[in-house]
Image: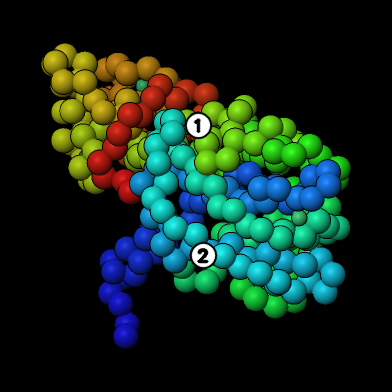
Amino acid sequence: MKLPIAASLVVLLASSSAHALWINEFHYDNVSADQNEGVEVAGPAGTNLMGWSLVAYNGNGSESYDSIHVQGIIPDEGAGYGAIWFPFVGLQNGSPDGIALIRPDDSIEEFLTYEGTITAADGPAVGLLSSDVGVSEVSSAVNTSLQRIGFGSQAADFTWNGPVPHSRGLLNDGQSFVAPAPTFVRGDCNADGGYNIADAVRVLDLLFGTMPATCDDACDTNNDGNLDIADAVFLLSNLFSMGASPAAPYPGCGVDTGATSIGCAAFAACP
Ligand SMILES: [Ca+2]
Ligand SMILES: [Ca+2]
Ligand SMILES: [Ca+2]
Ligand SMILES: [Ca+2]
């Protein structure tokens, strides 16, 4: 079946928005008999883990040796994110060994190893080179674990730390979340998906009326970090007298990465 372009885009967006989970904490080894081995999965609150799984990889031979299905709905434990812990008895003690987080469509969300790297020889991660977390649990204390810490909203924002006291099922100590900034189109001040004179009217209404914008960055058409009459002039000049186009993000949706960002709370016309 050949999908119309719009439908294909929806499929792409749906699959990319599903790629928002990560392994947040795990424990595989401690002094004497191993206790409370397991893996924590974290991500946006409300995410249903139905269909997701964790696959353990043996560094000796690089093949998968066990897997578990995960389940549950990620709770909101702070700023719209949360974590769920899954006991995983028998996680091998290195070195190296690894864990892959597998999406419902059997593609790989993450392939992490400890005490070295692995190129998977079978299973869903076959052919993929792992990412070594860089910390390990050799002779670590009972009820400690390796955990991601730092500040952000996705796996790459955090760094691995530990062994430290476990936080099974809870966001980690030293881990803070921010909601990702919404994407917007500069110049589309009224956030209706179009770029036209109505946006200049919206800028004037913002300046001289009573209605604040939901995304100030979209109305800062000249990207100077201020909202003023120059933004209306810039927009009209671009529309009607060959003036310069707005700076990125324009004409597509994106985030403001520049130093002139003045904030964007919500922007209805971008995903
Ligand atoms: Ca173990
Ligand atoms: Ca945790
Ligand atoms: Ca508009
Ligand atoms: Ca401006």
For marks 1 and 2 on the same chain, the one whose residue lies earlier in the sequence: 2
Disc 1: CA contacts within 10 A as few (<14), some (14-19) or many (>=20):
some
* Residue 271 as seen in the image, left or right of residue 58: left
Residue at image location 28% in from the left, 69% down from the top: 7
Q: Can residue 160 be seen here?
A: no
The image shows residue 212 at horizontal and vertical percentages of 21, 21
The image shows residue 265 at horizontal and vertical percentages of 33, 29
Residue at image location 52% in from the left, 71% down from the top: 106
154 up-or-down from 107: above or below:
above
In the image, what residue type sits under mark 1?
A: Phe
In the image, what residue type sits under mark 2?
A: His
* Residue 257 as seen in the image, left or right of residue 237: right
Residue at image location 32% in from the left, 18% down from the top: 227
Q: Quadrant of residue 66?
A: bottom right
Q: Quadrant of residue 267?
A: top left
Q: Which residue is mark 1?
A: 177
Q: Quadrant of residue 188?
A: top left
The image shows residue 116 at horizontal and vertical percentages of 84, 56
Give 147 or 230, whichever is nearer the viewer: 147
Q: Which residue is mark 2?
A: 69
Q: Can residue 135 be seen here?
A: yes
Give 167 or 19, whichever is nearer the viewer: 167
Which element type, helix, strand or loop, lies under badge 1?
strand
